[in-house]
Image (spheres, grey):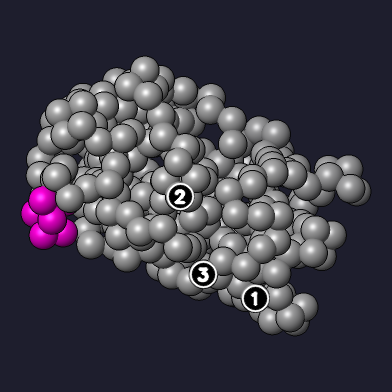
């Protein structure tokens, strides 16, 4: 394996993160400046505010990541950055910082796909065996990605409307929780003794796509009806009904995909991989089916730059470096 020492920058949404990683898996530092508190008062991420916060944080985060790693900037092999997808103003901050570093240090630049990062977060923890299947679940994404070989990403299913984390956050808001609401719904669902029966949206029998907006509307209706009748909202039972529906569909589609594509491993990634209901159901089903399951630790599931370095290491091995004309691309394809 080719060795590397990569400084990676991730600013696609509301975390400013900088990491220094050796050989794509040995994390020397992974600084994450979260903006959650800033956005909480708005009930969600405000793009313009996110960009400004990235500008405030980026230079200090780079300095801190380098110091914590105990390396000299000149020792770096290259500078990696999330090129997309994400909020364009947020991405631009990371991209311009990475280009400036690459230019000043005379080092190669590597543009990385955010989802490739989420998937290769698993490589930090364990070697991957191909073919493998990734279930990517976050605030912006819900995707099933087949990797027949290293770095060969094939999108086989995606959400047709809301991302799963987005649906969690909207449901949480209806139930009276602050942003980001996913963890609150998760906790409530696990404590609930009963569940409100909600629909499962499977779409066409052979489809690996997802749809969560109908389910989200069903939850909002249930909440509004209780309020109109002057009854207490069955918050816990609704949370459990919602979580049961979401996790059953995610898990069953992922298991079917693993079988159809002959995957050796199933990788769970993205911020919603923190969901305990999903972990429990997926672990149980994978055990039943004899499918090896990888789930990275929480810090590598939510947005972070170590995962970007892990994905950039593959490109470094292939010599796939970018020019200083690299453009942030909010719609970048995998
Ligand atoms: O990957 P991530 O940090 O950012 C994006 O790239 O979107 O994911 C954040 C999302 C939020 O929607 C948050 O509510 C959700 O992950 N999330 C959860 C849990 N922890 C975080 N959703 C459900 N259950 C959780 N325990
Ligand atoms: Zn993400």
- Dot label at residue 292: 1
Place residue 121 in its image quadrant: bottom left
Pointer 1 with pointer 2, Cβ within 8 A:
no
Q: Which residue is more in the foreground, 24 or 118?
A: 24
Comparing labels 1 and 3, the label whose residue is closer to the camera: 3
Please tell me whether residue 53 is drawn above or below residue 179 in the rendered image.
above
Q: What is the span of residues highlighted in magenta in the rendered image? A: 65-72
The answer to which of marks 1 and 2 sits earlier in the sequence is 1
Comparing labels 2 and 3, the label whose residue is closer to the camera: 2
Determine the CA span between mark 1 and mark 2.
27 Å
Q: Residue at x 45, y 41 (%)?
A: 319
The answer to which of marks 2 and 3 sits earlier in the sequence is 3
- For residue 316, side relative to residue 211 (left or right): left
Q: Residue at x 29, y 42 (%)?
A: 78
Please tell me whether residue 29 is drawn above or below residue 291 in the rendered image.
above
- Dot label at residue 78: none
Q: Is residue 174 visible?
A: no
Specify the principal SS of the magenta part: helix
Q: Which residue bears the numbered disc 2? A: 317
Q: Which residue bears the numbered disc 3? A: 127
Q: Residue at x 59, y 36 (%)?
A: 334
Q: Which residue is more in the foreground, 82 or 106?
A: 106
- For residue 227, side relative to residue 285 (left or right): left
Whether residue 47 appears in magenta in the rendering, the answer is: no
Residue 306 percent location from the top left of the image: 34, 53
């Amino acid at each position: 394996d080719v060795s590397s020492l990569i400084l990676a920058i991730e600013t696609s949404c509301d975390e400013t993160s900088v990491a220094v990683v050796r050989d794509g898996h040995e994390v020397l530092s992974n600084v994450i400046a979260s903006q959650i508190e800033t956005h909480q008062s708005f009930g969600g991420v405000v793009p313009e505010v996110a960009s400004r916060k990235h500008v405030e944080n980026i230079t200090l985060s780079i300095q801190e990541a380098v110091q914590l790693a105990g390396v000299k900037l000149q020792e770096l092999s290259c500078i990696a950055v999330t090129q997309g997808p994400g909020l364009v103003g947020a991405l631009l901050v990371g991209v311009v910082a990475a280009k400036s570093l690459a230019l000043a240090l005379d080092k190669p630049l590597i543009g990385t796909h955010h989802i490739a990062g989420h998937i290769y977060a698993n490589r930090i923890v364990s070697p991957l065996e191909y073919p493998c299947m990734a279930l990517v679940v976050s605030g912006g994404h819900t995707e099933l990605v087949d990797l027949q070989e290293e770095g060969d990403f094939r999108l086989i299913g995606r959400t047709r409307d809301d991302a799963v984390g987005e649906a969690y956050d909207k449901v949480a808001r209806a139930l009276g929780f602050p942003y980001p609401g996913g963890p609150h719904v998760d906790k409530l669902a696990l404590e609930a003794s009963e569940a409100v029966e909600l629909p499962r949206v499977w779409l066409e029998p052979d489809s690996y796509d997802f749809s969560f907006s109908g389910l989200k509307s069903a939850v909002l209706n249930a909440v509004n009806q209780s309020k109109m009748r002057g009854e207490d909202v069955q918050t816990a039972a609704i949370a459990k009904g919602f979580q049961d529906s979401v996790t059953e569909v995610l898990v069953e589609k992922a298991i079917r995909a693993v079988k159809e594509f002959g995957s050796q491993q199933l990788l769970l990634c993205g911020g919603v991989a923190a969901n305990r209901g999903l972990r429990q159901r997926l672990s149980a089903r994978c055990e039943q089916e004899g499918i090896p399951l990888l789930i990275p630790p929480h810090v590598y599931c939510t947005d972070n730059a170590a995962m970007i370095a892990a994905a950039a290491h593959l490109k470094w091995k292939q010599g796939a470096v970018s020019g200083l004309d690299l453009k942030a691309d909010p719609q970048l394809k995998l």
